[in-house]
Image (cartoon, rainbow, N blue to C red):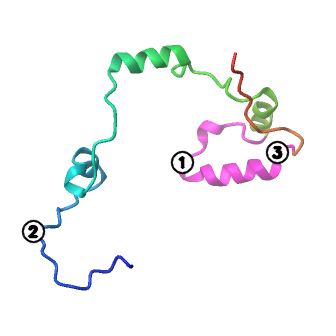
Amino acid sequence: MSGTITGPVNKKKIPAIRGPENIYHFPEQYGGEHCGITITEEQLLEVAEQSDVLEDTNDYLRPAVQRECEQHLPDPDDIQPEEAKKAYLYLKLHADKNVSWHCRIDLE
């Protein structure tokens, strides 16, 4: 079945879509339901402290990967968002093929 409407449309039964924000806040108006959970700011801060996500670090890159990035993209802060794809493809083409780019996760 296609999404094409073939019969007369009762515009009063179709809610006006004002964008994703409206659908998110009022899902029941669009045939959906609230599925999210409420998280307090204190809970977010606790997770941030435990994970060090707020720390300014590049430690998430393995040292060999970090060196490859620095060698081929010396000023990553100068890369604009619209250039990210091109920078990634350049790095992929020029980086050392012997460097393992896979993430390593320590579960201890």
Which type of secondary structure does the marked residue at label 3 adopt?
A: loop
Which type of secondary structure does the marked residue at label 1 adopt?
A: helix
**Can you identify the residue that label 3 sits on?**
95
Depth check, mark 2 against mark 3: the one in front is: 2
Q: Which mark is residue 38?
A: none
At 51% from the left edge and 20% from the top edge, which residue is drawn? 54
What's under tag 2, amino acid-wise? Lys
> Residue 53, percent across and down?
53, 22
> Residue 58, percent across and down?
66, 25
Above/below status of 2 relative to 18: below
Q: CA distance from mark 1 to mark 2?
A: 42 Å
> Residue 64, percent across and down?
82, 31
Q: Which residues are magenta?
A: 72-96
At 21% from the left edge and 48% from the top edge, which residue is drawn? 26
Q: Within 10 Å of the Cα at label 2, are there few (<14), some (14-19), or many (20+) other Cα atoms?
A: few
**Can you identify the residue that label 2 sits on?**
12
Q: Within 10 Å of the Cα at label 3, are there few (<14), some (14-19), or many (20+) other Cα atoms?
A: some
Q: Furthest residue to the left?
A: 12
Above/below status of 48 relative to 26: above
**Can you identify the residue that label 1 sits on?**
81
Q: Are marks 2 and 3 in contact (CB under 8 Å)?
A: no
